[in-house]
Image (cartoon, rainbow, N blue to C red):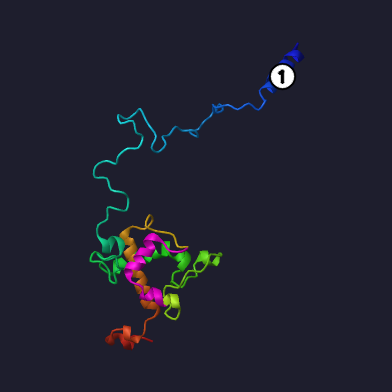
Amino acid sequence: MNRALILIVSLFALGGCRGDHFTEPPIHFNPNMDTQDYYKAYGSSELFADGRTMREPPAGAVARGFGKTDDAYDRGTDEFGEFITSFPAQVSVSRPLLQRGQERFNIYCTPCHDRTGSGNGIVVQRGLNKPPTLVDPKDVNGQRIIKMPVGEIFHTITNGKNTMPAYRGQIPTADRWAIIAYLRALQRSQNADISDVPAADRGKVQ
């Protein structure tokens, strides 16, 4: 009896393997949110009175990144779209700003550019292509970056360039300007000469 029952069940099971196509999805006993319902763009919906799934943005809503109105501070450009060559009025270069810039530089920039800005960071030592030096005036790229307008440096940090990713999501605007202020100090320190020392203090230099 048991053998006959097993044979009948086996025949029914084999009958279900005929290759038939079904329009319904297979039974998913433990969905775990894998098959969530969602609307498709431009689809219809009975939930809203107008029958559309796509909704108009609330009045006064501003897309991310478009609510910033100060070109110099928020974009590093003037009213004509040219990169600014001096720090915006909101940025006061001071010791606390440089210290903040150094801290942020060491966190975000040194993995590639190293602490001196030479471009020998730890990820470069592990095989990443070496980025251009930020501080060496004897190097063509170094000269370019030393002379680069601060607005262009801000734009590069914000939006990325080549293999460098955009950092606007990780580094707030104020910290980007702090990093640039510290970079300028770093460039100056790497290429200082006696004329950069106040006359009264030059006798102390060895």
The N terminus, quarter of image: top right
Quarter residue 79 falls in: bottom left
Number of marks in picture: 1
Front in this rendered view, residue 122 or 84: 84
- Residue 68 is at least partly visible in this image: yes
Taking the spot 32% from the left edge, 67% from the top edge, the residue there is 151
In-image side of 104 versus 85 (left or right) = right
Front in this rendered view, residue 97 or 13: 13
Circle 1 residues within 10 Å: few <14, some 14–19, many ≥20: few
Q: Secondary structure at mark 1?
A: helix
Task: Report the residue that reaches farthest toward the top.
Answer: 1
Taking the spot 45% from the left edge, 66% from the top edge, the residue there is 110
Q: Position of residue 130 (x, y in %)?
A: 51, 69
Front in this rendered view, residue 138 or 24: 24
Residue 105, placed above or below residue 48: below
In-image side of 29 versus 88 (left or right) = right
Residue 184, placed above or below residue 197: above
Q: Position of residue 21 (x, y in %)?
A: 60, 27
Quarter residue 45 falls in: top left
- Residue 103 is at least partly visible in this image: no
Q: Position of residue 194 (x, y in %)?
A: 34, 86
Q: Which residues are magenta?
A: 143-162
Taking the spot 40% from the left edge, 75% from the top edge, the residue there is 144
Q: Amino acid at mark 1?
A: Leu
Quarter residue 13 falls in: top right
Residue carrying label 1: 11
Residue 51, placed above or below residue 81: above
What secondary structure is the magenta-colored segment mainly?
helix
| Residue 183 within the segment the image draws in magenta | no
Task: Report the residue that reaches farthest toward the bottom.
Answer: 203
In-image side of 15 versus 152 (left or right) = right
